[in-house]
Image (cartoon, rainbow, N blue to C red):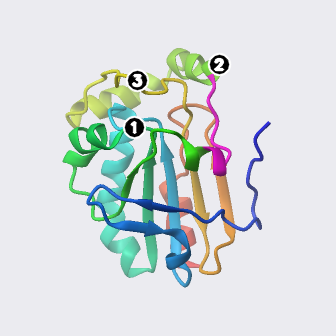
Amino acid sequence: MTHLLQQGDKAPLFHSTDQSGLPVILENYLGRKVLLAFFRNSACALCNTRVHHFIQQYSKWRQQGLEIIAVFESPEANLRDNVGRQTAEFPLIADPEALLYDKYGVETSEEKVQATLSDVNTKNFISEAEALGFKLIKEEGANFHRIPAEFLIDREGIVQVAHYGRLITDHLPIETINGFTES
């Protein structure tokens, strides 16, 4: 069983590169607040909708001292071809071997995927994604059963909120992120 992070845990450090080939070193974010978001894969319409919401909030959040790092269990080429088409001003990281997912205890669950598909609210999320132009397509070679997770990390590198999704559509409320930026 993978260790699930909790409030008060030190955020596991990592080194990676983003969609532009720039280094992303979590240790370099000390002194700033971070929203670290783990998504299913770069073609996931629901994930792309969430990234869209982040893009809309990012300039305000950044002024309040919050940085975003978004991780996808996808190869670099898929990242560029899918979610990379959105103009995110924050790092998008391809993690096809799921090394960062393992570090943060982000789960894979066929049961939670099935629960999402049978959840009555999922239709609304799909409709929103389609209205934004995100099609429901399956990314070749992607882990279809990955469940999203989001972490709010304070200026000292300590996890203040560890949110492991109960469903694919379960994310931290924007109000919770806003509250973290204002604290």
Which circle marks residue 151 in the picture? none
Q: Which residues are magenta?
A: 102-109
Which one is nearer the viewer's eye here, 81 or 15? 15
Location of residue 13 (image quadrant): bottom right
Rendering coords of residue 178 (x, y %): 49, 67
Say if residue 111 shows up in the picture: yes
| Distance from the alpha carbon under mark 3 to that under mark 1 | 8 Å
| Distance from the alpha carbon under mark 2 to that under mark 3 | 20 Å
Q: Amino acid at mark 2?
A: Glu
Residue 104 is a magenta residue: yes
Location of residue 55 (image quadrant): bottom left
Comparing labels 1 and 2, the label whose residue is closer to the camera: 1
Residue where numbered disc 1 is placed: 74
| Distance from the alpha carbon under mark 1 to that under mark 2 | 21 Å
Dominant secondary structure of the residues highlighted in magenta in the image: loop
Which quadrant of the rendered structure holds the N terminus?
top right
At a point 56% along the width and 50% down the height, the residue shown is: 100
Q: Amino acid at mark 1?
A: Ser
> Which structural element holds mark 2?
helix
Rendering coords of residue 151 (x, y %): 59, 58
At a point 63% along the width and 25% down the height, the residue shown is: 109
Which circle marks residue 141 in the picture? 3
At a point 61% along the width and 19% down the height, the residue shown is: 110
Q: Choose the circle earlier in sequence order: 2 or 3.
A: 2
Q: Amino acid at mark 3?
A: Gly
